[in-house]
Image (spheres, rainbow, N blue to C red):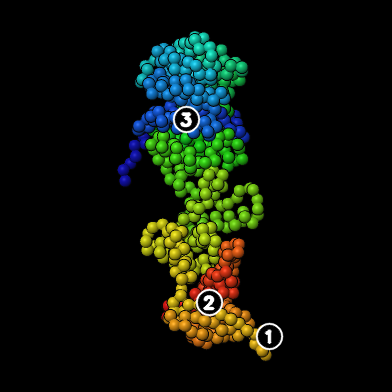
Amino acid sequence: MNKMPFERYQPFETVSLASRTWPGKTIAKAPIWCSVDLRDGNQALIEPMDTTRKMKMYRMLLDMGFKEIEVGFPSASQTDYDFLRTLIEEDMIPDDVTIQVLTQSREHLIRRTFDSIRGAKNVIVHLYNSTSELQRRVVFRQDKQGIIDIAVEGAKLIKELISTIPETKIVHQYSPESFTGTEMPFAIDICEAVMEVWEASPENKVILNLPATVEMSTPNVHADQIEWFCNNLNKRDSAIISLHPHNDRGTAVAATELGLLAGADRVEGTLFGNGERTGNVDLVTLAVNMMTQGVDPELDVSDITQIKDTAEYCNQLPVHQRHPWVGELVYTAFSGSHQDAIKKGMAALKANNSDQWEVPYLPIDPQDIGRSYEAIIRINSQSGKGGVAYIMQNDYHMDLPRDLQVNFSKKIQNIAETSGKEITPEVIWDSFDKAYLRTTTPVEFISHTTVPDTHAAEIRHLTAQINHFGEAKEIVGKGNGPIAGFTDAIAENLGVRLSVEDYHQHSLTHGTDAKAVAYLELKTAEGETVWGVGIDPNTTVASIRAIVSATNQILASS
């Protein structure tokens, strides 16, 4: 085994925060959400969105309830510029929605940005420059004051240009790009310098967006950074602290949740985490996570499949089958023990008639976000009786007794192991039908009549018409009821001696054409157990058909 070159890397420097408070807090309300799908997400696509796709994404974001949407980088892209002008000139921005535009702290880009937003009602102008120690040293080759000067000059120009578009309400936003790689005291210094230019106050709050442009630490360190920043920022009441996490370490969702506990007010991200490298933070996952904790996410994800389909169309990228909450397989159990627990949990929920969701292995009711119960349990070689029983009950309304579940699941297990593939509900039903219902050879039941014994009222005589290897035949028997009478007739006329060990019955359908299903566990004279199943509108006939089912299984195996 090759040794990994771990010596090339250094542990991320922690934050000195002895009195941190975030570990004891909970998220009690949704943050201010800002979608950056049309800018940050779009820049990360193999093929950036055309106007049709951008418009479809924009409309869906509005439908979901986003009140802040970063619509592009108009100074850097003619497509973004033209798209923004279309939104403004065709009056496509609702009065309660604020669009956001990004610009570097460079004069010609800022001026172009102001040209693009002319005529809009509410705009967040998002100014940024990189502040990390690494970027200062190897990219910009500037000291700290030089970097502050870049930010301040851009802030001054934005303030100056506001008078040129008096019809537009401007909200200021500043990002010290690569915040997570910036020394915390310097991050404070540069943000406060920008706030001073923009005359931040409680009535004129500035959005300070703190990007994890590259996710560099564990989520707890990110939370420490946010709490330290909030604690040490002068005029904290004049700032909206915003998070912009990326997912390089695969922990963007956790880092965001802990960052909110640490004092952040706002989150920028994308649907399903699209974005540069491993992506931005996933806003859909964050929203559903909140809902599972009893918090109103203030975003409508009630049709999560439609949201996924639209995102896949616009981004031309698939959402993974195991993606949290929305993946095709996330509400599917193949494991036998999981299937059994889900089946019992669903039954208990129905019996309790409670609105409180409690089902093992399902932290959320799939129907609450537009998914269905149909694919919760799927069958392969890893599945057990619980999964097969769930499919039979959920898809075909057959409530199999436990021992029959065991009996039938062995047949399905054999099919799954032989094929090595997933077993569909249709295959399961066809296998059940062949094993227990379509057993009309050599015996086929036609009809029966019973009459009481003239000497013993508790005894009834049964006469049944059957086909035996296709030949019509009449058989007779007696017992304390039709089931006992028919088993006696089978024994006397066909030589198959059966005793009833267990009996279950339930309605299969409702209404005037309702059918009943009977499950009979029978034992042969040799002590072998066999299950028979019968379906008929008449409950007695259903039971007789179950005896015929068992009889044919025995005769077929002899």
Residue at image coords 58%, 34%: 298
Q: Name the residue under label 3.
A: 58
Residue at image coords 52%, 36%: 286
Q: Quadrant of the C terminus?
A: bottom left
Question: In the figure, residue 461 lies in which quadrant?
Answer: bottom right
Graded by Cα atoms within 10 Å as few (under 14), some (14 to 19) or many (20 or more), the crowding at tag 3 reads many
Q: Position of residue 232 (x, y in %)?
A: 56, 21
Q: Marks 3/2: CA distance? A: 63 Å
Instruction: Name the N-terminal-most of marks 3 and 2.
Output: 3
- Quick one: 237 or 556, which is closer to the camera? 556
Graded by Cα atoms within 10 Å as few (under 14), some (14 to 19) or many (20 or more), the crowding at tag 2 reads many
Is residue 339 placed above or below 51 in the rendered structure? below
Instruction: Name the N-terminal-most of marks 3 and 1.
Output: 3
Q: Name the residue under label 1.
A: 457
- Quick one: 357 or 424, which is closer to the camera? 424
Amino acid type of the residue tagged 1 in the rendering:
Ala
Left or right, 225 with respect to 78, comes to right
Amino acid type of the residue tagged 3 in the rendering:
Tyr
Q: Mark 2 points at which residue?
A: 547
Q: Marks 3/1: CA distance? A: 80 Å
- Asked whether the beta carbons under mark 3 and mark 1 sit within 8 Å of each other, the answer is no
Q: Position of residue 161 (x, y in %)?
A: 48, 10
Q: Marks 1/2: CA distance? A: 24 Å
